[in-house]
Every structure is written in structure tokens, then in C-alpha cells.
Image (cartoon, rainbow, N blue to C red):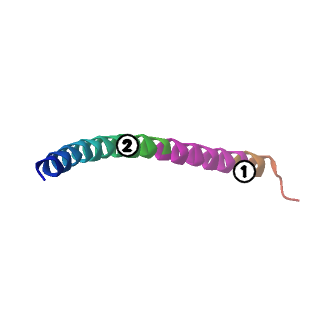
Amino acid sequence: MKWKKVVEKIKDIITGELKGGFKVFSVSLESKLSGFRLAIESIRICKFISIVYNQKIHLRRFKPC
């Protein structure tokens, strides 16, 4: 009976440590993903600005009859 309590206590300690480690890993991963999200949004904005700029140049070259 005492061994079961000892084994249960050891199991609780190990699972507690694992949960803490996964929580730290999860926070780290989430921060890295938010950095990638920011980079992707920046690329999209740059592409949009480039498209608008190129269209503006084409409109300047267009001369109506």
C-alpha cells in the first residue's frame, strides 16, 4: 500500500514537470509563430505597395486621345 502512494507521488511529480516544460515550449512556439505572422503580413503589404506603385507608373505613361 505504501509503495502505491510512493509511485503515485513520483508520477505526480514527473507529470507536473512535463506539464511545466510543455507550457514553456508552447509559449516559445507561439511567440515564434507570431513573428512569422508579422513577417508574412509585411511581405503582403510590400507586394501590395509594389502593385499600386507599378499601376501608378503605367497610368502616368497612358495618354488619352
Three-letter code, disc 1: Gln
Chain part drawn in magenta: 37-54
Q: Magenta segment, principal secondary structure?
A: helix
Residue 2: x %, y % from top left: 10, 49
Between 18 and 42, the one nearer to me in the picture: 18
In the picture as drawn, the residue positioned furthest to the bottom comes out as: 65
In the picture as drawn, the residue positioned furthest to the left comes out as: 2
Alpha carbon distance from label 1 to label 2: 36 Å
Q: Residues within 10 Å of mark 1 (few under 14, many from 20)?
A: few
Residue on which the image places disc 1 = 55
> Residue at 24% across / 42% down in the picture?
14
**What secondary structure is found at the residue carrying circle 1?**
helix
Between 55 and 29, the one nearer to me in the picture: 29
Left or right for 38, reference 26: right
In the picture as drawn, the residue positioned furthest to the front comes out as: 1
Residue 41 covered by magenta stretch? yes
**What secondary structure is found at the residue carrying circle 2?**
helix
Between 37 and 55, the one nearer to me in the picture: 37
Residue 54: x %, y % from top left: 71, 45
Residue 33 covered by magenta stretch? no
Residue 33: x %, y % from top left: 45, 44
Residue on which the image places disc 2 = 31
Left or right for 38, reference 45: left
